[in-house]
Amino acid sequence: MATHAQTTSDPMVVVRWLDLLVLVLALPVFVVAGFSLTGYATGAGVWLAQRALQVAVQRRAEASSEPRTIVGLTAGSLLLRGWLVALTILLVGLGDNDAGLAAAVLVIVLFTIYFNASLILRAGAPSR
């Protein structure tokens, strides 16, 4: 007989949240290497904000049965999150070049990991 933990465990949970794990692991790297902690805080903050927005919109889209709503939410979220990240990094970079560069590099690394993890998760998902 299967227990509740066995039926609800997700073997891909680490892949799904790998970008957030790397975000946590990046802090000691920033400290030891002497990179801008303002850049880390900016990159981490905007990454967490856009990921929270992505999760909320994804849940709302999955709850909808209307294709136009799903596409609208997904596309709108993608554009909004991209602009949020870009403008935040730009504004910080205008005030402090090192912080802007550090934030941009951190976000690029996190996006690369997130994008590849998404491809892995979609490849393993059952087709409809």
Image: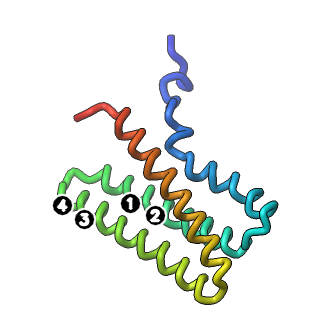
Q: Secondary structure at mark 1?
A: helix
Question: Contact (CB < 8 A) between labels 3 and 4?
Answer: yes
Picture coordinates of residue 74 (x, y %)? 31, 60
Question: Contact (CB < 8 A) between labels 2 and 3?
Answer: no
What label does residue 68 carry, if any?
Answer: 4
Disc 4/disc 1 C-alpha distance (Å): 14 Å
Q: What's the amino acid at mark 3?
A: Gly
Q: Secondary structure at mark 2?
A: helix
Q: What's the amino acid at mark 1?
A: Val
Residue position marked by numbered label 1 in the rendering: 57
Q: Label 2 neighbourhood size at 10 Å, few (<14), some (14-19), many (20+)?
A: some
Q: Label 4 neighbourhood size at 10 Å, few (<14), some (14-19), many (20+)?
A: few
Residue position marked by numbered label 2 in the rendering: 53
Would residue 62 appear left or right of 55 to someone viewing this image?
left
Residue position marked by numbered label 3 in the rendering: 72
Disc 2/disc 3 C-alpha distance (Å): 15 Å
Query: What residue appears at the point 22 percent right and 35 percent down from the top-left corner?
Result: 128
Q: Earlier in the sequence, mark 2 or mark 4?
A: 2
Q: What's the amino acid at mark 4?
A: Arg
Q: Label 1 neighbourhood size at 10 Å, few (<14), some (14-19), many (20+)?
A: some
Figure quadrant of residue 123: top left
Question: Contact (CB < 8 A) between labels 1 and 2?
Answer: yes
Disc 1/disc 2 C-alpha distance (Å): 6 Å
> Which color scheme is applied?
rainbow
